[in-house]
Amino acid sequence: MALVNCPECEVQVSDTALKCIGCGFQIRKPKRGFFGKLFKWTFILFNALMAFWLFSYFGSMGEIVSASESEAAQAGAAIGATIGTSMIMGFWVFGDIILGLLVLFTKPK
């Protein structure tokens, strides 16, 4: 363990210290642990995949609604698209809440 000078007040502190003991200046940022990084990247990938899923679903629903021949079929396709979109959005929100809490609870102190 070596001693380094604080850039703010020139007091000698440990090189492993996060803050200066004299003035409270933050010397280095705390880092996330393994699970913190895992949850953070899972959260990011989940949101990217959900956005891709939603936009690809919109594309396929546009084709289905426009390909329907009768008005009743178009109305049914529109209702189905609304229900499907609501389910995707609900899953997205629920997943974001769970993963967001895990990211929040594993952030560095």
Image (cartoon, rainbow, N blue to C red):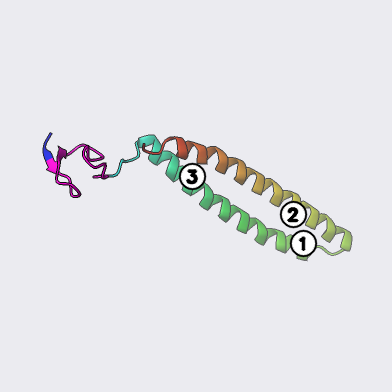
Q: Which residue appears at 15% of the width and 42% of the height? A: 11
Magenta-drawn stretch, dominant element (helix, strand or loop): loop
Note whether 8 is above or below 67 in the view shown. above
Question: Bounds of the magenta span?
Answer: 4-28
Report the side of 84 relative to 101 (left or right). Answer: right
Q: Where is residue 7 in the image (x, y as percent from the top left)?
A: 18, 49
Q: Which residue appears at 84% of the width and 58% of the height? A: 75
Cα–Cα gap, marks 2 and 3: 26 Å
User: Which label's residue is closer to the chain start, 1 or 2?
Assistant: 1
Which label belongs to residue 27? none
> According to the image, label 2 marks what residue?
81
* Residue most extreme to the left: 2
Cα–Cα gap, marks 3 and 1: 33 Å
Note whether 94 is above or below 47 in the view shown. above
Q: Nearer the viewer, residue 86 or 10?
A: 10
Dot 1, crowdedness within 10 Å: few (<14), some or many (≥20)? some
User: Which label's residue is closer to the chain start, 3 or 1?
Assistant: 3
Q: Where is residue 52 in the image (x, y as percent from the top left)?
A: 56, 55
Question: For residue 16, which quarter of the picture?
Answer: top left
Tell whether position 7 is magenta. yes
Which label belongs to residue 65? 1
Question: For residue 56, which quarter of the picture?
Answer: bottom right
Marks 1 and 2: CB-CB under 8 Å?
A: yes
Cα–Cα gap, marks 1 and 2: 9 Å
Of the 4 image quadrants, the one containing the C terminus is top left
Q: Which residue appears at 17% of the width and 45% of the height? A: 6
